[in-house]
Image: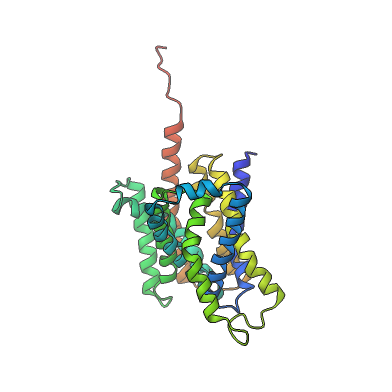
Amino acid sequence: MNPGILYGLGAYLLWGMFPLYFRLLQRIPALELVAHRVVWSTTLIAVGILVAGRGKAFLSVARSPRVWIAHSVTAVLIGINWLVYVWGVNHGRVVECSLGYFLNPLVSVGLGVVVLRERLRTAQWIGVALAGCGLVYLAAGQEGFPWLSLTLALSFGTYGLLKKRAPLESVDGLFAETLVLFLPALAWIAFRETPSQGPLHGATVLEWTLLIGTGIVTTVPLLLFSMSTRRIPLSLVGFLQYITPTIQFLIGIAVFHEAFSIRKLHGFALVWFGLALVLADGILKSARRTSPPRSSPNG
């Protein structure tokens, strides 16, 4: 098997298991969790860059104000995404979180139309329309407006759009983003924690280990993803990405036993059908683009 496929599977499987990890830290408020995630991720990536001898290379490209302006915006977006996701997981809304990541490619299509002035093909229009109907159907029922799913989809979709134009790529980009968030995160931890009280007062060894481990669970999937995208076609990467929300959806239903009404099933089904149309259209277009031209009967 192509190593790139294995790397991609590893990344998306790890991302899919995130609800199990963060649920072990359910006692800790989401903002504290994200602050620690930022601090430990920054520390781990900094050590990795220094060990790899890439410190000077990073500093040379990070001197431009344009770099920090661009990555400050992406840092805010990924910070919002992390915060909303952790809050959703630890408040028993894993299924809604999974919907957000099912919606993400559809949001990317919409952003392509609005921001990049791209033109949609018929199948894409139908897919986006079905997903929109699914969201309206969910919002019109007793389920309430799916703000959590939309926030995750919009924040990550916009993050992906801006990352394509950002000066730094992969690990360097994530390092710049976590550096932007590092001081605010550290200040928040210092403000909230005192020797006698605070969210982490009386935290167990396991909780501290898991908090420090957030740096690992943030960076390892990213590295696997980066190695995967260098070795396999982007269309295959796009197909593999649905592993993550599928696993999260199953965890929410089968492990955490979250309520999943018939109405919610109908709304999800509309989104899934829309997503399937967009995905199938993309696969067919990719196949036509890569297929060899037919030879002429006359030679």
Regarding residue 275, the answer to whether it shows in the image is: yes
Regarding residue 13, the answer to whether it shows in the image is: no
Q: Position of residue 99 (x, y in %)?
A: 47, 64
Furthest residue to the bottom? 196
Residue 6 vs 249, above or below: the answer is: above
Task: Name the residue at 45% across, 26% down.
Answer: 292
Return the residue nearer the eye: 159 or 42.
Answer: 42
Task: Name the residue at 67% across, 83% down.
Answer: 202
Q: Position of residue 156 (x, y in %)?
A: 44, 59
User: Is residue 109 rendered to the left or right of residue 23?
Assistant: left
Q: Position of residue 111 (x, y in %)?
A: 34, 54
Q: Position of residue 21 (x, y in %)?
A: 63, 67
Task: Name the residue at 41% across, 76% down.
Answer: 144
User: Is residue 248 rendered to the left or right of residue 75?
Assistant: right
Return the residue nearer the eye: 17 or 124.
Answer: 17
Return the residue nearer the eye: 148 or 158.
Answer: 158
Furthest residue to the right? 205
Work out which quarter of the rendered image holds the N terminus and state it. Answer: top right
Q: How many marks?
A: 0
User: Is residue 115 rendered to the left or right of residue 217?
Assistant: left
Work out which quarter of the rendered image holds the C terminus and state it. Answer: top left
Q: Quadrant of residue 92?
A: bottom right
